[in-house]
């Protein structure tokens, strides 16, 4: 444990860097509450999106890193602001027009358009918990509705009344003049309509801990701030929640960063030390727009899990949190293959390198072996040329390439084969565009057929390529069906036919034979697909048979 902790204290992996920053909070000893509290916040105004998952995943990585470098117990809270008023009807729900009459009602008072829960807020909370449970996160779920109504927030609300002028002063500095005239940190819930009221306060009474206000019809009301009758505006709520719970760390998106001084100041005003923060860059859709719960743009968690493993999503979330990420379907194959590359590397690394490896943080140090003997990108191309509709159609090729593999012994590979077939049919197949070869390309493809069908001819082509490059060394004995030999053939033919740069030759193979502008290491692909099958594929490309696909 000492070596692990010592290495973690020096690691440059960002979760360890953040964990060390949190540890400095406790230089004088453990917190009075007995644990370090990590929090993530969520507004259930729409279906949980992938950014919400990313926030919990990244916070969990920092929490796990903290547990390596400290003996202080930890706790993670996922807090849902489900008492917030619905300001906009989401466009990605059934019959959105039916929700129009519930605008400004708390999300836990808006009917569930999906008809499965007591409210829209409850539905979205349940979705969030299901997602988090799928990934095995250890967390406690807090509902703002329950937090306010149960009295857990009462002491901080009373403190906000006592410090009303001070908290208002913090807020008013950040508001435009016209907004200052009507602003209050308190949002009463109308006793009759239940709507969240954005109205100025006529009186805030520290003796009775009540507020007095007029509703839209001019009727005066006086309500206690306790017991769920009143909630705080979202910026004061942030700081007040930190103070009420004793939060030590919370991360949030770049769009919150300008509010950090406000959150911190309110937390301190209400009697608690502000937590440490980590600001991450935003998640963008395919068009470069910020993803949103209410519009449903970008890829959802369920959609990612339709085409790839949960671990590949965690890997994607680990990478460069300070860099904006485009969340669309075309990032999935790369994430899958890179995740398995890191798994394979992990078990060859020393402890320092292992703790800098993303998979250490994804698996909290208990890193499995990868049994992906065929890359995901290769499976996609195999699905393409095989016209696969089911993963079983791929296994005949896989087992010829890797006889020791089976669905039982290589479950990750079996799962990936199913994902690849689904991904290919949904995304790759509709976009494939084949073209006819040029004269130069046709001559090279014809030579490739000859080389694949005659090992001695292939060796002669490789020898010619080597000689042209100044290498006259005799060729070693080779396995004519191996990845390396087949790749050498492809490489030699590209060189012998004058492709410069050589990537134009590989682009030819992809565009003429696979209908794509990029693809796998072609020698490896032919080893997987089969030499005879590859010869026939090239003939079909030369004969124009693929153009009709």
Image: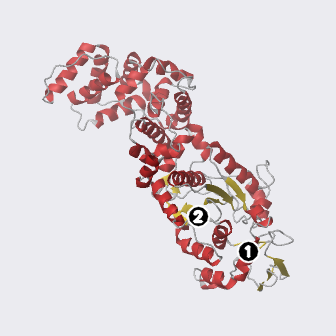
Residue 1 at x, y = what percent? 48, 46
- Chain-order first, disc 2 or disc 1: 1
* Contact check, label 2 and label 1, Cβ < 8 Å: no
Badge 1 marks a residue whose secondary structure is helix
* 202 in relation to 365, above or below: below
Residue 470 appears left or right of 115 = left
Q: Quadrant of residue 421?
A: top right
Q: Residue at x 36, y 28 (%)?
A: 522
* 369 in relation to 29, above or below: above
Q: Residue at x 32, y 33 (%)?
A: 506
The label shown at residue 248 is: 2
Residue 465 at x, y = what percent? 19, 26
The residue at which mark 1 appears reads as 157
Q: Is residue 472 visible?
A: yes
Mark 2 or 1: in front is: 2
| Relative depth, front residue between 55 and 90 | 55
Q: Is residue 549 visible?
A: no
As measured in the structure, the alpha-carbon distance from the residue carrying label 2 to the one carrying label 1 is 20 Å
| Relative depth, front residue between 193 and 211 | 211
Colouring chosen for the image of the structure: secondary structure
Residue 101 at x, y = what percent? 79, 64
Q: Quadrant of residue 272?
A: bottom right
Badge 2 marks a residue whose secondary structure is loop
Residue 436 at x, y = what percent? 36, 30
* 304 in relation to 321, above or below: above
| Relative depth, front residue between 372 and 349 | 349
């Amino acid at each position: 444990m000492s070596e692990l902790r010592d290495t973690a204290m020096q690691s440059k992996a960002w979760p360890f860097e953040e964990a060390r920053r949190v540890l400095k909070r406790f230089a004088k000893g453990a917190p009075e509450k007995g644990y370090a509290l990590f929090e993530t916040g969520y507004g259930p105004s729409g279906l949980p999106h992938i950014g919400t998952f990313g926030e919990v995943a990244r916070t969990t990585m920092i929490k796990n890193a903290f547990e390596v470098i400290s003996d202080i117990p930890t706790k993670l809270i996922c807090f849902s602001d489900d008492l917030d008023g619905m300001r906009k009807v989401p466009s990605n729900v059934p019959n959105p027009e039916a929700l129009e009459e519930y605008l400004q009602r708390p999300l836990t008072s808006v009917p569930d358009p999906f008809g499965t829960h007591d409210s829209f807020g409850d539905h979205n909370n349940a979705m969030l918990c299901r997602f988090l449970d799928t990934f095995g996160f250890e967390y406690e779920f807090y509902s703002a509705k329950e937090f306010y109504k149960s009295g857990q927030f009462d002491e901080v609300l009373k403190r906000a009344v006592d410090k009303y002028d001070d908290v208002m002063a913090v807020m008013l500095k950040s508001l435009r003049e016209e907004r200052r005239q009507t602003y209050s940190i308190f949002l009463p819930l109308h006793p009759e309509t239940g709507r969240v009221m954005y109205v100025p306060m006529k009186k805030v009474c520290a003796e009775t801990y009540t507020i007095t206000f007029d509703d839209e019809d001019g009727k005066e009301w006086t309500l206690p701030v306790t017991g769920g009758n009143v909630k705080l505006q979202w910026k004061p709520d942030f700081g007040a929640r930190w103070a009420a719970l004793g939060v030590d760390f919370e991360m949030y998106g770049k769009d919150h960063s300008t509010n950090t001084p406000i959150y911190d100041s309110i937390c301190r005003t209400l009697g608690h030390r502000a937590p440490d923060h980590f600001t991450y860059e935003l998640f963008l859709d395919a068009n470069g727009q910020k993803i949103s719960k209410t519009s449903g743009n970008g890829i959802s968690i369920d959609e990612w899990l339709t085409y790839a493993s949960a671990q590949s999503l965690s890997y994607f979330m680990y990478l460069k949190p300070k860099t904006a990420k485009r969340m669309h379907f075309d990032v999935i194959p790369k994430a899958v293959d890179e995740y398995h590359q890191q798994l394979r590397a992990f078990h060859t690394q020393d402890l320092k390198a292992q703790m800098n490896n993303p998979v250490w943080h994804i698996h909290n140090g208990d890193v499995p072996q990868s049994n992906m003997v065929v890359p995901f990108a290769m499976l996609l191309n195999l699905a393409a040329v095989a016209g696969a509709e089911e993963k079983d159609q791929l296994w005949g090729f896989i087992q010829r390439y890797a006889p020791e593999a089976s669905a039982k012994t290589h479950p990750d590979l079996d799962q990936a084969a199913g994902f690849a077939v689904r991904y290919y049919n949904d995304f790759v197949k509709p976009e494939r565009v084949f073209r006819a070869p040029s004269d130069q390309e046709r001559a090279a493809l014809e030579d490739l057929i000859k080389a694949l069908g005659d090992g001695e001819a292939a060796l002669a082509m490789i020898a010619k390529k080597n000689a042209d490059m100044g290498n006259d060394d005799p060729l070693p004995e080779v396995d004519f069906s191996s990845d390396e030999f087949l790749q050498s053939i492809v490489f030699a033919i590209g060189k012998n036919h004058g492709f410069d740069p050589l990537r134009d030759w590989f682009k030819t193979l992809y565009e003429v034979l696979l209908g794509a502008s990029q693809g796998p290491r072609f020698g490896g692909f032919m080893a997987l697909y089969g030499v005879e099958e590859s010869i026939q594929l090239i003939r079909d490309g030369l004969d124009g048979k693929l153009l009709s696909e």
